[in-house]
Amino acid sequence: AQSVTQPDIHITVSEGASLELRCNYSYGATPYLFWYVQSPGQGLQLLLKYFSGDTLVQGIKGFEAEFKRSQSSFNLRKPSVHWSDAAEYFCAFRMYSGGGADGLTFGKGTHLIIQP
Amino acid sequence: AAGVIQSPRHLIKEKRETATLKCYPIPRHDTVYWYQQGPGQDPQFLISFYEKMQSDKGSIPDRFSAQQFSDYHSELNMSSLELGDSALYFCASSSQSVGGLSWETQYFGPGTRLLVL
């Protein structure tokens, strides 16, 4: 079955330090991959997405992610985190279907804590 | 830019009551999705609609039903509510008529927080 895994439930990073959040997927072909961020009690905001082409994608708020087919990974990175980046981060996946309104499958999320 | 609108934002119901959640997609978006997020959980896909027709179905309980109307807004109807239905319910929208791959991107609303007592 297709799935997406976020191995880290919690990550603590000092403000100004670099960040990498891991995401692995299980799917026989190239999936559509997304990273969303959720602040407490808030909705889900799209950070970036990968469909095809350049494997390094740039998103909002200074985030980027790299798709690595050989490792079935789509890790999220930021060179220098800010206290406002503290939130829950979800990796999401959907199969390529050539159309249709398929739902997203989310990972369990990674809770990011920023230390002063 | 206009976003997805959900109403109400908060709802408190008793067990066995019914609830109706509404979703107004981004203008010119023709596809709507519903998700349920329990406390401390990841969002779970419930159901989606494209051009008023059900498109994909996830883990939606039989007690729940949904539809999309001619103006593309959608309603999620929940009956015989149970304590376990307490959750944050998200609606997302996308466009399948714009062209390119933009239709693959779902934009989420702020959610409706449902509490069943």
Image (cartoon, coloured by chain):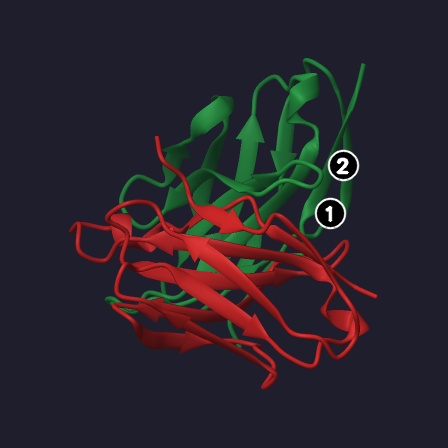
Chain colours: A green, B red
Residue that sits furthest to the bottom in the current view: B62
Q: CA distance from mark 2 to mark 1?
A: 7 Å
**Callout 2 touching callout 1 (CB < 8 Å):** yes
Q: Chain letter of disc 1?
A: A
**Residue at 69% over, 81% down:** B80
Q: Position of residue A96 (x, y in %)?
A: 33, 65
Q: What is the secondary structure assignment of the residue under circle 2?
A: strand
Chain at tag 2: A
How far across and down, in percent of the image, does residue A112 sit? 72, 34
What is the x, y in percent for residue A36? 53, 43
> Which numbered marker is on residue A11?
2
Picture quadrant where residue A31 is located: bottom left
Please give the residue where the numbered disc 1 appears in the rendered image: A8
Q: Residue at x 70, y 60 (%)?
A: B87
Above or below, A13 against B67 in this view is: above
Identify the residue shown where x is 44% and y is 52%. A33
Which residue is found at the position 70% from the left and 52% from the top? A7
- Look at the image and tell me in which quarter the N terminus of chain B lies: top left
